[in-house]
Image (tube, rainbow, N blue to C red):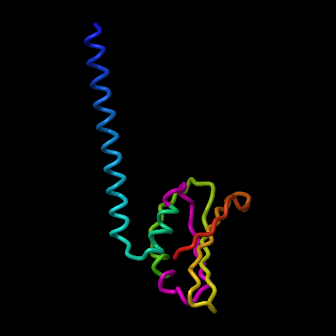
Amino acid sequence: MINKFQQIIKVFIVICLTAGVFLLAKKSYNKKVLQKSYTNSKLVTLKKYLIGHEKPQRVEIFSYTQRFEKDVAEIKKLKIAQSPQSNFYVTIQFFTDESDATAPLIAQIRFVDIKSGNQIKEESLNLE
């Protein structure tokens, strides 16, 4: 009886180790695919940030910069997973100091409750 119990435990441990290795390999593969599919570092930074949160109902993008117009246009083409059942949406505003040539592109990301219109969370990302 003890032998069978030990064998069951060993099989369970092997299954857990195999599942863990599989999940690590999958995560590593997803990172490589993300890095290869997008060459723009600003795009990759924003995509990584948005993947780390729940899926919004919709995404609204506003640009207040002329200098990074090409980058913003590329970001607008980005596919972001959305969920119609979600109770919030995301607004992303891009801006920079146009008078300073070294100023970075900033993305101000707001999570807004759909029913009340209240802001849930706000963060700014430096995309340089």
| Residue drawn at 32 percent across, 21 percent down | 9
| Residue drawn at 51 percent across, 80 percent down | 72
| Residue drawn at 37 percent across, 65 percent down | 34
- Is residue 99 one of those drawn in magenta? no
Q: Judge left or right: residue 59 versus residue 18.
A: right
- Is residue 61 one of those drawn in magenta? yes
Position of residue 71 measured from the top left corner of the image (x, y, whole percent): 48, 82
On screen, residue 1 above or below 102 = above
Position of residue 79 measured from the top left corner of the image (x, y, whole percent): 44, 68
On screen, residue 29 above or below 1 = below
Where does the N terminus fall, quadrant-wise? top left
- Point out the residue furthest to the bottom here: 99
Residue 79 or residue 68, whichever sits in front: 68
Q: Which residues are magenta?
A: 51-72
Position of residue 125 measured from the top left corner of the image (x, y, whole percent): 58, 70
On screen, residue 29 above or below 46 = above
| Residue drawn at 52 percent across, 76 percent down | 128
- Point out the residue furthest to the front here: 102
